[in-house]
Image (spheres, rainbow, N blue to C red):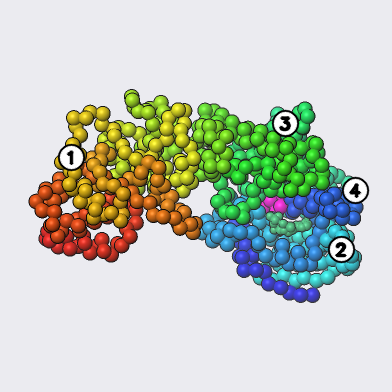
Amino acid sequence: METLEFQAEARQLLQLMVHSIYSNKDIFLRELISNASDALDKLRLAKLQDGLEADTSDLHIEIEADTEARTLTVRDNGIGMTRDEVVELIGTIAKSGTAELLTKLKEAKESPELIGQFGVGFYSTFMVADKVTLVTRKAGTEGHGTRWESEGAGTYTIDDAPDVPIGTTITLHLRPKDEDDALYDYTDEWKIKEIVKRYSDFISFPIRKGDEVLNSQKALWARPRSEVTDEEYHQFYRHISHDWTDPLEIINMKAEGTFEYEALLFIPSRAPHDLFQRDARRGLQLFVKRVFIMDDSKELIPDYLRFVKGVVDAADLSLNISREILQQDRHIQMIRRRLVKKVLSTIKDLMSSNPEKYATFWREFGRAVKEGLLSEPDNHKPILEIASFATTHGSEPTTLAAYVERMKEGQEEIYFLTGESRSQVENSPHMEAFQAEGYEVLILTDPVDEIWVDAVPEWDGKKLRSIARGAVDLKKDEEEKEPEGDFGPLLGFLKEKLDERVKEVRLSHRLTTSAACLVSDADDITPALEKMYRAMGQEGPRVKRILELNPNHPLVTGLRAAHERGAEDAALPDTAELLYGTALLAEGGDLDDPARFAKLLADRLAQTV
Ligand code: ADP
């Protein structure tokens, strides 16, 4: 027998379980049954796909309770585990992001949602037991099995176990009941039945206690919606998603005819912590005629809808279908298109039927959905229809349709400005004339916004237009404008002095209070995008921008006067640099040489005190 230590993170998690930060302890049984059900699925699949020799004629889960000995046993005749697998799967937490979540958990104390995100599974047994024994033998192996035991502290023991059947048996040595602490008598027949009925009724294998089968085993997606309670859907959602919170929306689909399938999809009500991590689990579960085939089937749902959970049961696929075949299967592609259409139209319906739910959806998943504007040009329209954006028109996000309805007379384009935060965008010099003239501007602050705006030229016949790009002319009245001619020599001088940094210097029609700002040429990439490319390790040429001056600003008129008095004035080049640097800072940009800028500014200030 060997005594081993839990990995540090596993130890922390166990601690949390033992000190039961979690008020609903009943769920430990759901977790054990869920694991057992997965193990049965895996055994059936190994036989089907890998030709493993195994008896799958009576796959089931068995519960035994001993009131005297205060033990509860859950047994399955599924795939089982090897000794190495027990050490790896039960002794460690391999999942990414767990460390991060643990820290959060400790801060949050009572936070079932966070635990739900873990799928703490097996460890939840230590909420109700002071000792847990697991005996298992892997299908396809000969001889002895493995016995694992722990009291939930820092260590566990592991040993060979002779005469063990295929599958896994988990025995909980229950703590004394303490109903004040929601710790019930889990050997009680009624309690067990209640928990199974509530959390595990849909499990497709029989859950037996003695001669009795405790669950109905009905595949939820095959039952008419009217016959299934929300509670049943929610428990099923938890089983497949490991998410504690109830889903925001449930979608049923059924197609008959040449290619039959049923789907049951869930839109979660909160984004998982790893929504933007590459290695996160995504995709749907694929079944063929009620038989589980695979998890995380990415072929069924595009990446930008990766948060959608659920099951697709296709009647006409082969049980042996592999991932490679799946990728090319025409029917799968067709299902995928239909699922996308259905998810998008469900969200669209929510916008009018339940604006609050829609707002939650967009807050949680909008950033992911917008990636679809890049990957699925065919779906620009339905995606933009369900999108909403922060705007200078009030604090609530707006749809594009609502924006267009509010457009000013004569306005032909949809204006937006990208940036890192709302306040940075709102206070950007580019915004001045738009605000002064009462034009609404969309405020786009997600990193993906920088990219999709280039991929989507227009919406509803209106061009999408960055107000930090190209020339802007909001004043229709020519009389009000400064003649460029008077500024000609100054503009030429500045262009020469700032030649390395700007491609043009011109008068601006977009400034009301600032002296200067920088704009990108209509076809050039923006500095934010340039920065993103550089962050990804792609070194491109630096794109020069255009310096625009406010002809009504005293600094600019003063500069013109100084330049007229004498172009040789030694202070002028420094002023040019200060002007450029201030424009860059005002939009939240980064100076090339901040120390030099600070010195120029200090010297100049010193002359005024
Ligand atoms: P999760 O189920 O979320 O992966 P658990 O801690 O509950 O996390 O289980 C860890 C792993 O241990 C499972 O993914 C599975 O591989 C294995 N395991 C747990 N219970 C069983 C079982 N009854 N039969 C076979 N393997 C199991």
Residue neighbourhood size for the residue with mark 4, other residues' Cα within 10 Å, grouped as few (<14), some (14–19), many (≥20): few
- Alpha carbon of mark 1 to alpha carbon of mark 2: how far? 90 Å
Q: Nearer the viewer, mark 1 or mark 2?
A: 1
- Alpha carbon of mark 2 to alpha carbon of mark 4: how far? 19 Å
Q: What residue is disc 3 on? A: 254
Please tell me which residue lies in front, 468 or 251: 468
Q: What is the x, y in percent for residue 50?
A: 84, 53
Earlier along the polypeptide chain: callout 1 or callout 4?
Answer: 4
Earlier along the polypeptide chain: callout 2 or callout 3?
Answer: 2
Residues in magenta?
24-31
Question: Marks 1 and 4: CB-CB under 8 Å?
Answer: no
Earlier along the polypeptide chain: callout 3 or callout 1?
Answer: 3
- Alpha carbon of mark 4 to alpha carbon of mark 3: how far? 30 Å
Q: What residue is disc 4 on? A: 57
In the image, is residue 586 part of the stretch drawn in magenta? no
In the image, is residue 26 part of the stretch drawn in magenta? yes
Q: Nearer the viewer, mark 4 or mark 3?
A: 3
Q: What is the x, y in percent for residue 368?
A: 54, 44
Earlier along the polypeptide chain: callout 4 or callout 3?
Answer: 4
- Alpha carbon of mark 1 to alpha carbon of mark 4: how far? 92 Å
* Label ID, residue 141: 2
Q: Nearer the viewer, mark 1 or mark 4?
A: 1
Residue visible at 66% across and 33% down in the picture: 338
* Label ID, residue 485: 1
Residue visible at 14% across and 60% down in the picture: 570
Question: Marks 2 and 3: CB-CB under 8 Å?
Answer: no
Residue type beneath disc 4? Ser
Earlier along the polypeptide chain: callout 1 or callout 2?
Answer: 2
In this picture, residue 205 sits left or right of residue 502: right
- Alpha carbon of mark 3 to alpha carbon of mark 1: how far? 70 Å
How many marks can you see? Answer: 4
Residue visible at 74% across and 50% down in the picture: 34
